[in-house]
Image (cartoon, rainbow, N blue to C red):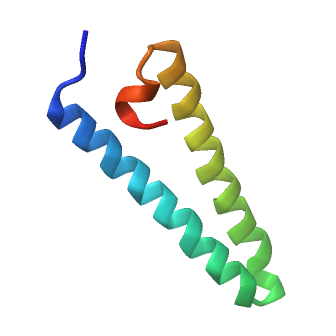
Amino acid sequence: MKPSETYLEFIHDVLITVHSGIHELQGRLAFCDPAERDYIEGRIFSYTEFLQTLQTSAREFGLSDEIGL
């Protein structure tokens, strides 16, 4: 079954948002004070783990190419 355009747009929007969040946090990490460091690193880890979960699921369902993962 081929995913619909709406589905693909939704997934792409989520991926763009997650990638933007990672990049924004990485930028903040470079200038944060020590008290914020663990929090920011934890958020980066969570975002990265979420992306890895999406990649694994997309592969298992044969959707990697369709959604660009």
x%, y% of residue 9? 23, 43
| Residue 52 picture quarter | top right
The number of callouts visible is 0
Where is 3 relative to 14, above or below?
above
Q: Residue at x 53, y 14 (%)?
A: 60
Residue 17 versus residue 50 in the image, above or below: below
Residue 54 picture location, percent across and down: 51, 33
Q: Nearer the viewer, residue 35 or 43?
A: 43
State left or right for residue 59 relative to residue 13: right
Left or right: 16 as drawn, with respect to 30: left
Name the quarter where the N terminus is drawn.
top left
Residue lying furthest front: 65
Q: Position of residue 53 (x, y in %)?
A: 58, 32
**Is residue 4 placed above or below 44 in the rendered structure?**
above
Nearest the viewer among 48 and 37 is 48
Q: What residue occupies the far top of the structure in this picture? A: 1
Query: Going by the image, does 58 lie left or right of 41?
Result: left
Relative placement, left or right, of 69 versus 10 is right
Name the residue at 58% across, 25% down: 56
Q: Horizontal and vertical percent for residue 61? A: 45, 14
Residue at image position (44%, 15%) is: 62
Q: Which residue is depicted at the point 63% across and 80% down?
A: 27
